[in-house]
């Protein structure tokens, strides 16, 4: 059952960190064998941010996550890579949100989505897990579905391949090149959310490949 999401409060024994206005969470699995897999699309998006914004470094390890803090488009953000494996992502995200005093509406989660064609993206203000176990875990631990998300399309498997096996495969070369472009567009979409708001960003990026 979902639990209410209390912000960092008076009763806590843990001291809050410095100011962070937004979380950009990328979902994925830790480990060398998962690096280039479809299920790690959220991590790939964060890696694209770091590539283009060299002041970000994943040099902080806290509450089962790697963290890179800095400014993106003039906004103080923390890039979050949960290290829990996908199905337990909420165990990292929720405690960090409380520690940094970031409310759910300022937690933008990027994740792979088999219900979208490969190399497409969609911004959404809220919603259910849609069968994605990482999102299900975050919803459970935050106690709400009302947080924004960036869905990164990876397509569905052909034939009889189970989805669970498909998402753990590496992108094919042509898919990878298409996804690189999508990640770059995704970074621009994230910047738009931070600077102009979610509604404007949705109008600007959704459905425009």
Image: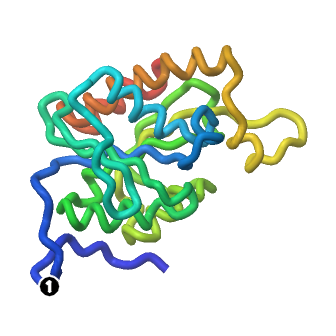
Rendered image quadrant of residue 50:
top left
Q: In the rendered image, is residue 121 in sight?
A: yes
Q: Is residue 153 above or below residue 103?
A: above
Q: Is residue 92 left or right of residue 84?
A: left
Which of the two residues, 151 or 203, is positioned nearer the viewer here?
Answer: 151
Q: Is residue 22 left or right of residue 18?
A: right
* Residue at the image position 44 percent from the left and 42 percent from the top: 110
Which of the two residues, 79 or 162, is positioned nearer the viewer here?
Answer: 79
Q: In the rendered image, is residue 113 in sight?
A: no
Mark 1 = which residue? 11
* Residue at the image position 31 percent from the left and 20 percent from the top: 52
Indicate how the structure is coloured in the image: rainbow
Q: Is residue 66 left or right of residue 35?
A: left
Q: Residues within 10 Å of mark 1 (few under 14, many from 20)?
A: few
Which of the two residues, 146 or 58, is positioned nearer the viewer here?
Answer: 58
Percent of width and height locating residue 12: 17, 80
* Residue at the image position 85 percent from the left and 42 percent from the top: 161
Percent of width and height locating residue 134: 53, 56
Rendered image quadrant of residue 9:
bottom left
Percent of width and height locating residue 21: 16, 48
* Residue at the image position 12 percent from the left and 31 percent from the top: 74
């Amino acid at each position: 059952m979902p639990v209410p999401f209390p912000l960092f409060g008076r009763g806590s024994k843990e001291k809050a960190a410095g100011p962070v206005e937004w979380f950009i969470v990328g979902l994925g699995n830790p480990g060398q064998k998962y690096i280039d897999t479809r299920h790690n699309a959220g991590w790939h998006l964060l890696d694209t941010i770091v590539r283009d914004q060299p002041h970000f470094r994943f040099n902080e390890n806290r509450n089962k996550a790697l963290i890179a803090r800095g400014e993106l488009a003039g906004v103080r953000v923390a890039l979050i890579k949960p290290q829990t494996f996908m199905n337990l992502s909420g165990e990292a995200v929720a405690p960090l949100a409380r520690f940094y005093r970031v409310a759910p509406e300022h937690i933008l989660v990027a994740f792979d989505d088999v219900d979208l064609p490969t190399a497409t993206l969609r911004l959404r203000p809220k919603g259910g897990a849609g069968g994605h176990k990482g999102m299900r875990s975050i919803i459970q631990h935050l106690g709400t579905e009302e947080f924004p998300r960036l869905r990164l399309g990876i397509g569905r498997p052909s034939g009889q391949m189970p989805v669970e096996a498909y998402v753990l495969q590496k992108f094919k070369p042509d898919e990878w090149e298409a996804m690189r472009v999508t990640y770059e567009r995704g970074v621009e979409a994230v910047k738009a959310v931070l600077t102009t708001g979610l509604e404007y960003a949705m109008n600007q990026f959704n459905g425009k490949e």
